[in-house]
């Protein structure tokens, strides 16, 4: 006896059935959420990266990999930054710092 054509079509779960969970993949390093504090005892989130990455010594890329972060500017740059901050956010604390700088 011939089977109806609908028997050959795979059927999905019945209506109203809970979704089937996705299969678990290999466990990777834990992901840090914004604002989340990672304990010092936590496993490394970058196990394949050298501990000296971003430093100008040791294994891994040097400070050029930081893209300008961590570079120290001149003292004049810092004073200009303080003056700009005071112009936008005037406060007694910044005023006192700028006055102390001007006295030197």
Image (tube, rainbow, N blue to C red):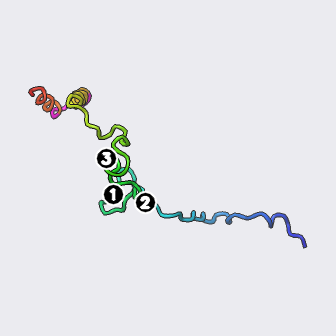
Callout 1 secondary element = loop
* Disc on the earlier residue, 1 or 3: 1
Question: Residue 11: x percent and y percent?
Answer: 73, 64
What residue does disc 2 label?
A: 29
Farthest residue, direction front: 58
In screen coordinates, is 96 left or right of 18? left
Image point (80%, 65%), residue name: 8
Question: Residue 36: x percent and y percent?
Answer: 35, 54
The quarter of the picture where the C terminus appears is top left
Q: Are marks 2 and 1 in contact (CB under 8 Å)?
A: no
Mark in front: 2 vs 1? 2
Q: Which mark is residue 38?
A: 1
What's the distance in space between the residues labelled 1 and 3, CA to CA?
22 Å
Question: Residue 14: x percent and y percent?
Answer: 68, 66
Q: Are marks 3 and 2 in contact (CB under 8 Å)?
A: no
Question: Residue 89: x percent and y percent?
Answer: 24, 31
**45 versus 71 height, above or below:** below
**16 versus 80 height, above or below:** below
Q: Which mark is residue 55?
A: 3
Farthest residue, direction right: 1
Q: Which residues are magenta?
A: 88-93
């Amino acid at each position: 006896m011939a089977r109806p054509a609908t028997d050959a079509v795979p059927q999905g779960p019945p209506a109203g059935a809970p979704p089937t969970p996705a299969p678990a993949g290999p466990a990777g390093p834990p992901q840090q959420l914004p604002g989340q504090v990672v304990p010092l005892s936590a496993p490394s989130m970058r196990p394949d990266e050298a501990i000296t990455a971003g430093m100008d010594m040791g294994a891994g890329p040097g400070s050029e990999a930081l893209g300008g972060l961590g570079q120290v500017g001149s003292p004049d740059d810092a004073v200009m930054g303080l003056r700009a901050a005071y112009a936008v956010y005037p406060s007694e604390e910044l005023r006192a710092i700028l006055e102390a700088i001007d006295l030197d």
